[in-house]
Image (tube, rainbow, N blue to C red):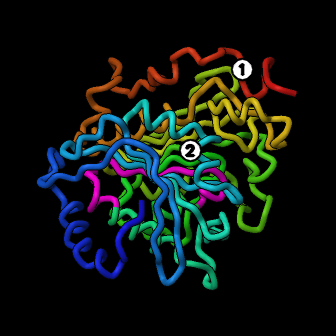
C-alpha cells in the first residue's frame, strides 16, 4: 500500500489537519467514509526527496465511521519497524486494545535525535516526516485527534520525547521505555502527560547521569523537568511490586501527570515483553521484568488522561481521605497478576 504523490496530498491535508485539531470539536463520527480493511500494511512516501517507510496496522474493529486511537511507535537504533513490533509486543496490544498503530522507520534505522533530544543540523528532518505521515493517516483513516500517542524505546524513546516537544499540537501523550529525555529547549505549547519505564541497571542509557554523550543527565532529572513543565504540584512514591517503584507527579496543569516506573535491577528492555525476557542472554541488554506490562500501563495511562483533560476536578473526587489528602492507589492494571508472578527483573526466574 502506497500513498499518492505528496504534491497531490499535502495541500488538502492542511485543511483536514487543522479541522481535526480545532479545540473544542468532539470526535464522535467521521463525516465521510474512510474505509480500510484490517491488517498490516507496508507504506512509503517521499519527504524532502528521501524515501521514508513505515508499517501500519489497522484493527479488525475499524469501520471507517467511529474514530479510533492512533499510536506512533518509534524503534530503537538498528531495529526495523517489524523487528520493533516483534520485540515490544505492541502489535498484540494494538489487536487487544483496538488502536491503529504506525511504526516509523528511521533513515538507516536511526532517528535524528542527539543530546537533549535535539536533532543534528546535518541530519534528516524526522519531525517533518512524522508530521506529514500523521496528516496523511488522519486524512485516510477515522482517527480520534484526542487520542494520538507516541512511544518508543531507547533512541526511539528519545525521539518520542522530541515529538512531545515539537508536535504537542498533535501528540496527546507519550510513553517511553529506556530513553526519556527532556528536550532543551522544550517547544511544547501545552502540558504533555508522560509515562516512562527505566531499569536501574540499564547498560546503555544509565539510570543515573553519565553514559554516552547524548545522555549525560539521569532519568529522574528528565522526569522532574517534565513535571515542572506540566506545573505538577504533588508527588508520591509507591512500591507496586517486588522490583517496581512508581514515582508519580500529579495535580498538574491540565491534569498532565508524569509517572516513572523504576525497575530495580532492570536492563535496557521492554517491561512485559516475552521477546526480551526469552532472549536476555543473547541480547546482553540486562534483565527484563514481567512483573508489569509497559503496554498495558501505557494504554491505561493514556486513556485516563484523555478523561482527565476534560475533568479538571479529577483528583478532587477520586481517592480523597477524611483529611482532604490525595490517596495514591495502584491502578487495577498494576495490581493485576503478572503472567508469571515473581519473574521480576532482579528476582528468581530470570534467564541467566
- Give above or below for 348 relative to 96: above
* Magenta residue check for 148: yes
The image quadrant where one finds the C terminus is top right
The image quadrant where one finds the N terminus is bottom left
Give left or right: position of 338 versus 14: right
Q: How many marks?
A: 2
Question: Which residue carries the number 1 mark?
Answer: 343
Look at discs 2 and 1 and give the one toward the viewer.
1
| Segment tinted magenta in the rendering | 137-158
Give left or right: position of 68 versus 114: left
* Magenta residue check for 114: no
- Give above or below for 225 relative to 261: below
Give left or right: position of 87 versus 167: right
Farthest residue, direction right: 352
- Give above or below for 243 relative to 270: above
The image shows residue 280 at horizontal and vertical percentages of 80, 35
Element assignment for label 1: loop
- Residue at the image point whose x is 75% and y is 30% from the top: 278
Farthest residue, direction left: 31
Residue closer to the observer: 264 or 8: 8
Element assignment for label 2: strand
Q: Within 10 angstroms of label 1, few (less than 14), some, or many (20 or more) residues? A: many
Question: Which residue carries the number 2 mark?
Answer: 196
- In contact (CB < 8 Å): disc 2 and disc 1: no
Q: Of the residues under marks 2 and 1, which one precedes in the sequence?
A: 2
Q: Within 10 angstroms of label 2, few (less than 14), some, or many (20 or more) residues? A: many
Q: Is residue 233 visible?
A: no
Give left or right: position of 232 versus 288: left
- Residue at the image point whose x is 18% and y is 48% from the top: 27
- Residue at the image point whose x is 73% and y is 44% from the top: 268
Amino acid at each position: 500500500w502506497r500513498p499518492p504523490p505528496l504534491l497531490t496530498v499535502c495541500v488538502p491535508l492542511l485543511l483536514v489537519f487543522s479541522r481535526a485539531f480545532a479545540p473544542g470539536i468532539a470526535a464522535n463520527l467521521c463525516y465521510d467514509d474512510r474505509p480500510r480493511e484490517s491488517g498490516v500494511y507496508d507504506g512509503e512516501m517521499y519527504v524532502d526527496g528521501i524515501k521514508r517507510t513505515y508499517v501500519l496496522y489497522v484493527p479488525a474493529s475499524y469501520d471507517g465511521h467511529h474514530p479510533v486511537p492512533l499510536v506512533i511507535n518509534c524503534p530503537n537504533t538498528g531495529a526495523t519497524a517489524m523487528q520493533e513490533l516483534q520485540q515490544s509486543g505492541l502489535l498484540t496490544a494494538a489487536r487487544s486494545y483496538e488502536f491503529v498503530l504506525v511504526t516509523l522507520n528511521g533513515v538507516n534505522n536511526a532517528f535524528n535525535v542527539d543530546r537533549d533530544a535535539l536533532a543534528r543540523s546535518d541530519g534528516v528532518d524526522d519531525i517533518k516526516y512524522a508530521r506529514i505521515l500523521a496528516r496523511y493517516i488522519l486524512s485516510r483513516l477515522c482517527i480520534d485527534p484526542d487520542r494520538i500517542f507516541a512511544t518508543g524505546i531507547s533512541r526511539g524513546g528519545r525521539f518520542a520525547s522530541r515529538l512531545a516537544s515539537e508536535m504537542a499540537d498533535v501528540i496527546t501523550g507519550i510513553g517511553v521505555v529506556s530513553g526519556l529525555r527532556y528536550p532543551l529547549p522544550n517547544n511544547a505549547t501545552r502540558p504533555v502527560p508522560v509515562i516512562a519505564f527505566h531499569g536501574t541497571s540499564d547498560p546503555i542509557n544509565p539510570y543515573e547521569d553519565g553514559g554516552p554523550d547524548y545522555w549525560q543527565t539521569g532519568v529522574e532529572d528528565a522526569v522532574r523537568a517534565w513535571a515542572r513543565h506540566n506545573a505538577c504540584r504533588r508527588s508520591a512514591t509507591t512500591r507496586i511490586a517486588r522490583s517496581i517503584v512508581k514515582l508519580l507527579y500529579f495535580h498538574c496543569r491540565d491534569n498532565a501527570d508524569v509517572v516513572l516506573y523504576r525497575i530495580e535491577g532492570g536492563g535496557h528492555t521492554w517491561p512485559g515483553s516475552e521477546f526480551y525476557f526469552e532472549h536476555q542472554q543473547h541480547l546482553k541488554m540486562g534483565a527484563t521484568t514481567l512483573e508489569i506490562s509497559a503496554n498495558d500501563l501505557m494504554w491505561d495511562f493514556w486513556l485516563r488522561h484523555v478523561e482527565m483533560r476534560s475533568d479538571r476536578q479529577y483528583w478532587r473526587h477520586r481517592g480523597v481521605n477524611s483529611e482532604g489528602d490525595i490517596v495514591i492507589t495502584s491502578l487495577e492494571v498494576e495490581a493485576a497478576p503478572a503472567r508469571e508472578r515473581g519473574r521480576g527483573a532482579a528476582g528468581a526466574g530470570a534467564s541467566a
